[in-house]
Image (spheres, rainbow, N blue to C red):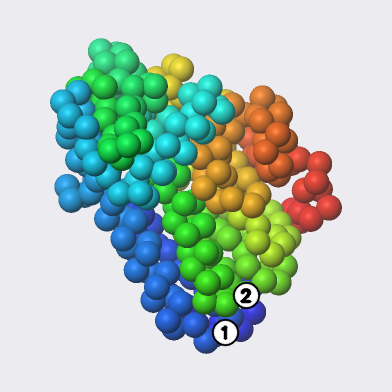
Amino acid sequence: MFGTVQTQKIFFAMGTVNTITVFEEADEALSAAKERVKDLDIKLSAYSHDSEIYSINSCAGIAPVEVSIDTFKLIKHSIMYSRLTDGLFDITSRPLSQLWKNAIRCGQLPCESSLNKAQKLVNYKNIILDYTKRTVMLKNKGQQIDLGAIAKGYAADEVRNILHAYGIKNAVINFGGTIINMGQQRNIGIQMPFAPNGQSAASIKVENGKAVVSSGLYEQFCIIDGSFIHHIADIRTGKPSDSGSLGVTLIGDNAEELDALATAAFIMGAEKSMELLKQHNIEALFITGDNKVYVTENLIEIIRM
């Protein structure tokens, strides 16, 4: 798919398998890239007790936490994306998303009181930033943040910067659905919802420097009491999104931006998200539950079904 592989680094971080493929000798660059991503994972994980995010969550409603430049910058950017999407992207949605992830694991729906309690904890406006001291605080006890919907994009952009610094011009960065293409034009496959991993619904010709980010409800789901339950919660209802989307793929210049906006676009649906995406020069492909595919106008010439 990508030509002759010269050098490749595969490792686990950010909750997924990460692959950096470089089409020239690049051992030193790949080692630096892996080290950078591992460092970010340590800071940004919501699950590791040693992370800065875990510290912020543990101190919610109690005290501010001094954090690294990376963590502070990414939280600041996340607040910006929340404003852009009227809160549909919100890193404080962890209490709500965890309820639905637990429901999928246990096969049991959460009770209404738990949902109501979790939903009240979701509000990006309760993130307090101190720019002088570089601290982050959540206003209320029980609030939690999770950067899982944006961290991979940020990390992929950082790896691109590292490869550029080493003079690498021809590479593919693939962080579990977050892809950056460097160098020659390549065909990137779009996962077919509910099909075996690697089975494509379409492929898109991706130019040098472009990022591709996909998000879909088929990644985590189950059937409970006859209802289809998935992990992408709509904070307006507190329940899994019912926008009609099965999957969304965004194409643009900045993987971090695409990562954040993919969540909001999924919840908004194809028609309602088009104006937002157009404003940010982002191309999109939506696969809906009625087996229809919607694409932005500029994708028509470069997509193959």
Q: Secondary structure at mark 1?
A: loop
134 left or right, relative to 264: left
Corner quadrant of residue 31: bottom left
Q: Is residue 107 visible?
A: no
* Label 1 crowd (10 A; few <14 / some 14-19 / many >=20): some
Quadrant where the N terminus sits is bottom right
Residue beneath the point at 63% across and 68% down: 182
Corner quadrant of residue 141: top left
* Label 2 crowd (10 A; few <14 / some 14-19 / many >=20): some
Query: Residue 269: image x %, image y %?
Result: 62, 29
Give the alpha-carbon distance from disc 2 to disc 1, as whole Å. 8 Å
Q: Which numbered disc, 2 or 1, marks the residue that appears first in the sequence?
A: 1
Residue beneath the point at 24% across and 20% down: 140
Q: Secondary structure at mark 2?
A: loop
Q: Is residue 116 above or below residue 207?
A: above
Q: Is residue 50 above or below residue 21?
A: above
Query: Residue 199: image x %, image y %?
Result: 58, 58
Residue beneath the point at 55% across and 51% down: 255
Q: Is residue 18 above or below residue 103?
A: below
Disc number for residue 109:
none
Residue beneath the point at 41% across and 43% down: 74
199 left or right, relative to 208: left
281 left or right, relative to 128: right
Query: Residue 203: image x %, image y %?
Result: 69, 57
Q: Do the numbered discs 2 and 1 sit on residues whose CB atoms are within 8 Å?
A: yes
Query: Residue 230: image x %, image y %?
Result: 42, 34
Q: Residue type at mark 1: give it.
A: Glu
Disc number for residue 24:
1
Q: Is residue 15 above or below residue 90?
A: below
Q: What residue is shown with label 2? A: 170
